[in-house]
Image (cartoon, rainbow, N blue to C red):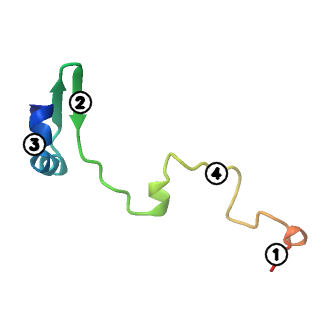
Amino acid sequence: MKTNVRTFLREFATFKAKAMRGEMVRINDGKGEFIFTAVQARKTLLGAGKGKITFHGDITGPTLPNSAWKPSL
């Protein structure tokens, strides 16, 4: 669907609902075209960090030996 900025701002709720149904909204202004789509939220913490968190090495076991672990109270 194509629209202009003024109509997009006036009828934002309508365009938001269309985007949530999977439609792509193209917004034209004098300088270019913008695309408005919906992105589904990730359900897990690991999924939310996908592409943002990197793991170096194996973190499934202890990362420090027992002698290096000195908690303070």
Give how far across and how far down residue 2 sits, in percent.
10, 31
In the image, residue 14 sits, relative to residue 33, either above or below, namely below
**Residue designated by label 1:** 71
Type of amino acid at the residue the image marks with label 2: Phe
Q: Is residue 25 left or right of residue 44?
A: left
The residue at 47%/62% (across/down) is 45
Query: Which amino acid, by three-letter code, is at mark 1?
Result: Pro
Do labels 3 and 4 touch, CB within 8 Å?
Answer: no
Q: Badge 3, how many Cα within 10 Å: few under 14, some, many 20+?
A: few
Residue 43, position as x, y percentages in the image: 38, 62
Residue located beneath label 2 in the image: 34
For disc 4, the neighbor class at 10 Å (few under 14, some 14 to 19, many from 20) is few
Q: Secondary structure under badge 3?
A: helix
Residue 30 position, x and y percent, is 18, 19
Classify residue 64 by image quadrant: bottom right
Q: Are marks 1 and 3 in contact (CB under 8 Å)?
A: no
Q: Amino acid at mark 3?
A: Arg
What's the CA distance linking mark 1 and mark 3? 58 Å
Instruction: Report which residue position mark 3 lands on.
Output: 10
Identify the residue under disc 4. Answer: 55
Image quarter (top left, top right, bottom left or bottom right) of the N terminus: top left
The residue closer to the viewer here, 9 or 16, is 9
N-terminal of the two: label 3 or label 2?
Answer: 3
Number of marks in picture: 4
Q: Nearer the viewer, mark 1 or mark 3?
A: 3
- Relative to 4, is 63 on the left or the right? right
Q: Is residue 53 above or below residue 45?
A: above
Determine crowd level at label 2: few under 14, some 14-19, many 20+ residues with C-alpha closer than 10 A.
Answer: some
Q: Calculate the distance from the C-alpha at mark 1 to the C-alpha at mark 4.
A: 24 Å
Q: Is residue 47 above or below residue 30?
A: below
